[in-house]
């Protein structure tokens, strides 16, 4: 059964700085998802990664997938306050979620 | 095109009561899933379905039943509510040929 772990669980960043969220998973997964959730809201799809070496970018966020290492990363470039949210990774076609990373960006 | 619709948005139940959380999608998606989200935690899969008449258990199925008589609807039943089922419940769907899931807005359930 797939297990998904994220770290860090909480991340406080200064605006303009770069940082990376890590997502490790336990068994083979043919896809890896990243979602964003604002407080009290539903989930918003950010990226779907389908193959080893896949890299996708949207604005200040870039996600990558290394299936051999069973690792996905979400890289934040030059953080801004609007990126403050909780970020989840999930694997498998049934969506097994990690515990999430709560990101706070401060001036 | 309404997407994934969940009703009700809020519900308070007494321990031992039963109820059904509704989930409907109008996108002709084959896959549908139910998740619960507890405070400060990720989403955990309760049940999922790959098509009408086909359902299977997820990570935390105890205390919940599902059925999938149509492609559009995937109701979640709580047979005898317990305080441990206090949570926010999300329904999601996707089509077979696509990879992204669409989520409903959630149902906030409190069991007292």
Image (cartoon, rainbow, N blue to C red):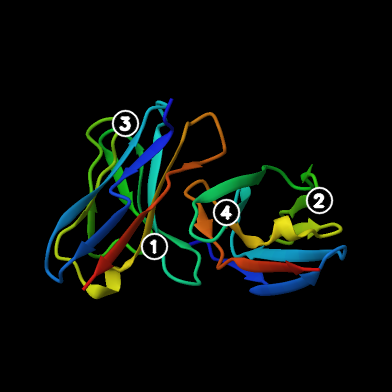
Q: Tell me if B51 is positioned left or right of A6 in this view.
A: left
Both on one chain, marks 4 and 3? Answer: no
Looking at the picture, how far across and down is residue A13, in whole percent?
78, 71
Disc 3: which residue:
B72
Give me the C-alpha separation between circle 1 and circle 2. 33 Å
Looking at the picture, how far across and down is residue A76, in whole percent?
80, 58
Chain containing mark 2: A
Q: Is residue B61 above or below residue A10?
A: above
Q: Residue at x 48, y 31 (%)?
A: B96
Chain containing mark 4: A
Give me the C-alpha separation between circle 1 and circle 4. 13 Å
Looking at the picture, how far across and down is residue B80, in whole percent?
14, 65
Q: Which mark is residue B59?
A: 1
Both on one chain, marks 3 and 2? Answer: no
State the quadrant of the C terminus of chain A.
bottom right
Answer whether labels 4 and 3 touch (C-beta < 8 Å). no
Q: Tell me if B37 is positioned left or right of B15 in this view.
A: right
Disc 4: which residue:
A91
Task: Classify mark 3: residues with Cα within 10 Å, few (<14), some (14-19) or many (20+).
Answer: some
Give me the C-alpha separation between circle 3 and circle 1. 23 Å
Q: Which mark is residue A60?
A: 2
Both on one chain, marks 1 and 2? Answer: no
Answer whether labels 1 and 4 touch (C-beta < 8 Å). no
Give me the C-alpha separation between circle 4 and circle 3. 24 Å
Q: Name the mark nearer the viewer: 1 or 2.
A: 2
Give me the C-alpha separation between circle 3 and circle 2. 36 Å
Tag 4, which secondary structure?
Answer: strand
Q: Which mark is residue B42?
A: none
């Amino acid at each position: 059964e797939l297990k998904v772990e994220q770290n860090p669980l909480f991340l406080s960043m200064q605006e303009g700085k770069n940082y990376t969220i890590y997502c490790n998973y336990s068994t083979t997964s043919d896809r890896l998802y990243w979602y964003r959730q604002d407080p009290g809201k539903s989930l918003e799809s950010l990226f779907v990664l389908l193959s080893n070496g896949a890299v996708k970018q949207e604005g200040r966020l870039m996600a990558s997938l290394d299936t051999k290492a069973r690792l996905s990363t979400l890289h934040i470039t030059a953080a801004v306050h609007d990126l403050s949210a909780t970020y989840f990774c999930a694997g498998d076609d049934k969506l097994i979620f990690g515990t999430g990373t709560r990101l706070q960006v401060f001036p | 095109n309404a997407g994934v619709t969940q009703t009700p948005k809020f519900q308070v139940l007494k321990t031992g009561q039963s109820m059904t959380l509704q989930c409907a999608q109008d996108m002709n998606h084959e896959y549908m899933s139910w998740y619960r989200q507890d405070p400060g935690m990720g989403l955990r899969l309760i049940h999922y379905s790959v098509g009408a008449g086909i359902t299977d258990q997820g990570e935390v199925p105890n205390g919940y039943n599902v059925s999938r008589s149509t492609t559009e609807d995937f109701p979640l039943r709580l047979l005898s509510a317990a305080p441990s089922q206090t949570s926010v419940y999300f329904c999601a769907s996707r089509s077979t040929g696509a990879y992204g899931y669409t989520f409903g807005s959630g149902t906030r359930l409190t069991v007292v």
